[in-house]
Image: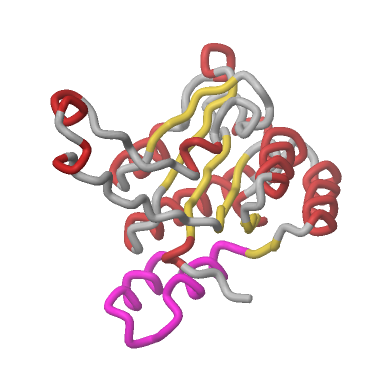
């Protein structure tokens, strides 16, 4: 099964100022997260960014926060290790909005029906720490019947052992493991896409 950009949402977990410096291979992890945010903007894939206890761990690193903002993404602060436990599902799977203001006072036959919300069921997820917040969020997303795609080269933990144990557990639970380049070329699909050269420049 290939990743479909029209069914995808990108979830970037806890790339925070006081957390990143202690992670194994942090430069590569952040570099790939930046690429994912750029790819999401290029393909109009919705982006969400989480921050764990931002008062204690600081905000998202500036470069990534700027790219997510540029892509029209939102930031979701939490205290639970699982973002799902903190209410993330409502953002990933929004319901139709009800008429507001004066529209509610109109007779039902004159009220405009809410626009249907396009549901995207594939969550492409990357973040820190892989064995804590990312793992718990991804497992909860699987429980909520999302298709979960974990971008391994954009995930970080303080130790390789913890990171790799999380990948094993996620794969066993039904998550798909892939890399940033896999995301890029599966969202792209064809060399005659208008964004082909931009994608090549991002992954090289």
User: Where residue 190 sits: x, y (%)?
Assistant: 41, 85
Residue ID at (44%, 41%): 94
Way the structure is coloured:
secondary structure
Residue ID at (60%, 33%): 20
Q: Which image quadrant is residue 176 in?
A: bottom right
User: Where residue 126 sits: x, y (%)?
Assistant: 60, 48
The prevailing secondary structure element of the residues shown in magenta is helix
**Does 24 sit left or right of 27 as displayed?**
right
Residue ID at (33%, 37%): 97
161 over 21 or under it: above or below = below
Q: Which image quadrant is residue 75 in?
A: top left
User: Where residue 63 sits: x, y (%)?
Assistant: 39, 39
Magenta residue check for 183: yes
Of 146 and 186, nearer the camera is: 146
Q: Give the number of marks.
A: 0
162 over 83 or under it: above or below = below
Of 103 and 55, nearer the camera is: 103
Q: Which image quadrant is residue 22 in?
A: top right
Q: Quadrant of the N terminus?
A: bottom right
**Does 60 sit left or right of 26 as displayed?**
left
31 over 21 or under it: above or below = below
Of 119 and 107, nearer the camera is: 107
Magenta residue check for 50: no
**Does 175 sit left or right of 62 as displayed?**
right
User: Where residue 76 sits: x, y (%)?
Assistant: 47, 29
Q: Residue furthest top?
A: 55
Specify the segment rendered in magenta.
179-203
Residue ID at (80%, 47%): 166
């Amino acid at each position: 099964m290939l990743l479909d950009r029209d069914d995808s949402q990108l979830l970037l977990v806890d790339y925070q100022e006081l957390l990143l410096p202690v992670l194994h291979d942090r430069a590569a992890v952040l570099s790939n997260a930046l690429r994912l945010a750029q790819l999401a903007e290029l393909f109009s894939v919705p982006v969400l960014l989480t921050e764990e206890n931002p008062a204690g761990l600081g905000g998202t690193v500036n470069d990534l926060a700027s790219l997510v903002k540029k892509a029209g993404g939102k930031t979701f602060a939490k205290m639970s290790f699982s973002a799902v436990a903190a209410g993330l599902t409502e953002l990933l799977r929004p319901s139709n909005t009800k008429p507001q203001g004066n529209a509610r006072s109109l007779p039902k036959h004159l009220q405009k029906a809410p626009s249907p919300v396009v549901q995207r069921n594939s969550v492409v997820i990357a973040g820190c720490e892989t064995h804590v917040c990312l793992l718990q969020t991804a497992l909860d997303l699987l429980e909520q019947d999302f298709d979960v795609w974990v971008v391994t080269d954009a995930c970080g933990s303080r130790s390789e052992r913890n990171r790799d144990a999380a990948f094993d557990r996620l794969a066993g639970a039904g998550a798909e493991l892939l890399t940033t380049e896999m995301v890029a070329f599966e969202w792209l699909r064809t060399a005659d896409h208008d964004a082909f050269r931009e994608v090549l420049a991002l992954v090289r």
